[in-house]
Image: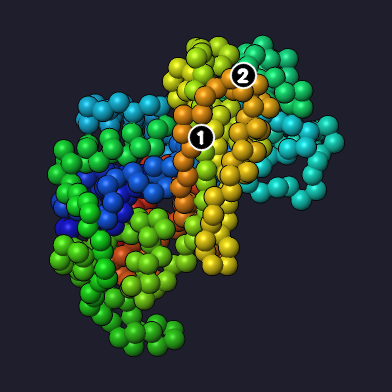
Amino acid sequence: MNVVIIGCGVVGAAVAYELCQVKGLKITVVDKQPPAQASTGAALGVLMGVISHKIKGNAWRMRHTSIQRYETLIPELEAKSGLHIPFNRQGILMLLLPSNPSLQGGQAPPNPPYEGGLEEISKWEKLVEVRQAQGLPLEIWSKAKLQQICPQIDDEEITSAVYSPSDRQVDPTALTLALVEAAKQQGVTFKFGVDVLGGVGDLLSRGVGEEGSRGEVNLTQVLSTEGKIAADWFVIAAGLGSHALTTQLNQIVDIRPVLGQALHLRLNYPLGNPDFQPVITGNDVHIVPVGGGNYWVGATVEFPSDTMEIPKDIQLLESVKQQALTYCPDLAFATTIRTWSGLRPRPEKRPAPIIDKLPGYNNVLLATGHYRNGVLLAPATAIAIREMISNNTN
């Protein structure tokens, strides 16, 4: 059975690797760019699972599945691909400020600030209880403990911190390239520089459904700049490109860009204890150690105008940098190595991500619109796509 995956960011690559473990599948991945471009290449790779406030339902299950899978996936990929994947196993440390109740997803609380942070601490204490019941460690640190363990953090406003030893950070580009290489070794075909232009399908049934629906279409092939590509299943994992692809298939999935900017800072020494370098986050600003005295800092969240244009707001990036300097003053001595930006795929008027059948089609699956959680949810997305194909072919 032939499967075509359109898009080779981290999600498309993860789907390809997961599917190539299934016997009887012949997999082809198509992308108009090389792997790990677009939003994947711009991501920070912060895997906020246990420390997120998602505690039930699919949103939590996907996070938990991915965090668990990463523990086995990284060594598995390194062994198969021969490539090194930078993977920070030292957890995530979230700084709490009295005027900063958790800003998960960049959304402000309804009535900030909480006086003295007491209400926020109560929220975290409840989350700690939930995680303990789930068998997952999560700790609340006093300010004294925080300063003892992470002396680089020197902000008088910080009241306490939450430490999640089970959460991780991974280099998104290195991860994607390893997924591609490991999938290649297991027979997956990759076609880069190939653009998909549309599709040709056969109508499966007519006059069925409550509204007299014409039934679902079985997509038989897609048209590309390299010719026709036939398959039994098609997986659209093209991020922002999914909007144009679904439009060509007359089933528009509205996905819009949200710009994120970040920067790479370099010190001559690591911050604090060189043997304990967790991701530090506060007020939706991440300080990501990437080896030695190198740190990624980001990211902005910039929405498009009515014309869908998003000019880079340099002042907003500077404010992110200044926030990081407030937390870790030694970063003021760092050199800015580079700045970069990327567009995140955010579904319009529906939750992210979109993992489902494309309406109107029997054999077209969507694995797209992950917004700010593409790297985090890539393993769980791949597992979900594998199950959808398996359940509909057995």
Task: Indicate the position of residue 364 as horizontal and vertical percent values.
Answer: 31, 65
**Residue farthest along the right direction in this orientation:** 115
- The 10 Å Cα crowd at callout 2, few under 14, some 14 to 19, many 20 or more, is some
96 is higher (above) or lower (below) than 189:
above
Task: Indicate the position of residue 287 as horizontal and vertical percent values.
Answer: 56, 29
329 is higher (above) or lower (below) than 223:
above
Q: Residue at x 39, y 37 (%)?
A: 172
According to the picture, the residue beneath numbered tag 2 turns out to be 330
According to the picture, the residue beneath numbered tag 1 turns out to be 263
Quadrant that contains the N terminus: bottom left
Q: Is residue 140 visible?
A: no
Q: Amino acid at mark 2?
A: Asp
**Circle 1 sits in a helix, a strand or a loop, which is it?**
strand
Q: Amino acid at mark 1?
A: Leu
Q: Is residue 207 visible?
A: yes
Quarter holding residue 94: top right
Q: Residue at x 47, y 66 (%)?
A: 254
Q: Is residue 105 left or right of residue 61?
A: right
**Circle 2 sits in a helix, a strand or a loop, which is it?**
helix
Q: Report the Cα–Cα distance between label 1 and label 2.
A: 16 Å
Quarter holding residue 247: bottom left
Q: Is residue 41 left or right of residue 27?
A: right
Mark 1 / mark 2, whichever is N-terminal: 1
Quadrant that contains the C terminus: bottom left
The dot on residue 179 is none
Task: Indicate the position of residue 2 as horizontal and vertical percent values.
Answer: 17, 58
Q: Residue at x 44, y 20 (%)?
A: 291
Q: Residue at x 65, y 21 (%)?
A: 329
Task: Indicate the position of residue 11 as horizontal and vertical percent values.
Answer: 36, 47
